[in-house]
Image (spheres, coloured by chain):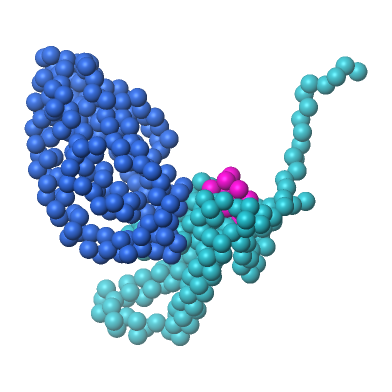
Chain colours: A blue, B cyan
Amino acid sequence: MKLSITYQESYSRGELLLRAFFGYFYLLLPHLFALSIFGIWGGIVQFISWWSILFTGRYPQSFFEFQVGLMKWSLRVNARMLNLCDGYPAFGINGTDEFTSFEIDYPESLSRGTLLLKSFLGMFYVMLPHGFILYFRLLWGMILGFLGFWAILFTGKQPESWHAFNVGTLRWSNRVSLYMGFMTDEYPPFSSKE
Amino acid sequence: MYHPIEQPEEIPVREREDAMGAYLMMFGALAAGLPLPIINLIASVVYYFINKDKSNFVKFHALQSLYSQLPTTLMNAGLIFWTLQILSVGLVETPFESFATANDIYWGYLYTTLTANIVYVVFSFIGAYKARKGLLYYFIFFGKLAYHQAYKIKIQEKSIMENLPPS
């Protein structure tokens, strides 16, 4: 899986302030509403895919593409809300973006044993260890996000390492989501690197 | 006039999986976390409209799955309504005692609905299996109906010609 968010040499102060004061209304609310509707469908699709993997050993390709589209969409929104890039995120499963990129190969076959293992014990061997680290990464990411806001406001730039840290957290959490969403058999590494 | 029926080797795996998914939509209600009978029907309707233009094969299976859900959905809805009506008596008595007031027709209806659901689930699994194999599987009545709608060549109702050659 490859996830990246382009680091901009300079960020718009106007957009930063707009997102800070009105982002909830013009960005988060409409996208969250649409994403939650699509998310219900995503849940149904995931549930059905579980049965499909169990019986056929394959994640139906059109379902897989739908889930990837959903993840791309939420990445576009998250990137803006975390001030990782400028611009307004495109709506929809097939929406495109110049700053964010999310790629994953379609697995031709998936293990039934791994499916059952992650379904019944995933909470213990995936969610607990990864969730523990991600919790602290998210906390630190929020602090960096807050500091990044002021850095952009005064200098128009964001330290590259802060940007890389938050992108890394998104990459890490997306890897966990892919594994727990039955979309890959590859156990997510304890790393935020590409 | 009907479109030619595709043979299994002509149908890509992707279309087979999409056709199979139509039958697995019966689990939609469970996935949505709402055990209401109408949810699986909504899921199937959405699924049909998303997939109907992919191919005649997918359209046939999506339609057959949708149609075959209608009777059980209506029966389930009736059963829930009836059961809630009986349970409402339990607001003054205990819920267990309120079932003592249910007549034989209710119990007969309950068992009929349960049987219909089991039959539906079994046929859906067979349909899903056949679809995955690239085969057309016709349910009683619904199969024929779905076939006509999916494979019939639609004749243009009226061709409006506004521009005509000089007379």
Residue A22 visible in the picture: no
**Residue at the extreme top of the image, as rendered:** A155
Depicted A117 relative to depicted A20: above or below: below
- Toward the viewer: A116 or B115? A116
Q: Residue at position x 9%, y 36% from top?
A: A140
Tell whether A145 sits left or right of A92. Answer: left
Query: Which residue shows up at 8% across the image and 32% down it?
Result: A143
Q: Tell me how many marks there are.
A: 0
> Could you say which quadrant of the image residue A170 lies in?
top left
Q: Position of residue B140 (x, y in %)?
A: 63, 69
Q: Is residue A114 magenta?
A: no
- Spot occupied by residue B116 in the image (x, y as percentages of width and height): 51, 74
Q: Quadrant of the N terminus of chain A?
A: top left
Q: Give the image location of residue A144, x and y in percent.
A: 10, 30
Which residue is pictured at 74% across the width and 40% down the height? Answer: B156
Q: Is residue B92 above or below residue B65?
A: below
Q: Which is nearer the eye, A7 or A150? A: A7
Report the residue at 26% width, 45% height from top: A175
Q: Within the image, what quadrant is residue A117 found in? A: bottom left
Give the main secondary structure of the magenta stretch. Answer: helix
In the image, the segment drawn in magenta is B51-60
Asked if one can make out residue A110 in the rendered structure from this viewpoint, the answer is yes
Along the line of sight, the residue nearer the viewer: B49 or B86: B49
Could you say which quadrant of the image residue A14 lies in?
top left
Q: Looking at the rendering, in which quadrant would you find the C terminus of chain A?
A: top left
Q: Position of residue A141 (x, y in %)?
A: 12, 35
Q: Give the left or right position of residue A123, taking residue A90 as reference.
A: left
Picture layout, residue B163 above or below residue A53 = above
Decide whether residue B53 is among the magenta residues.
yes
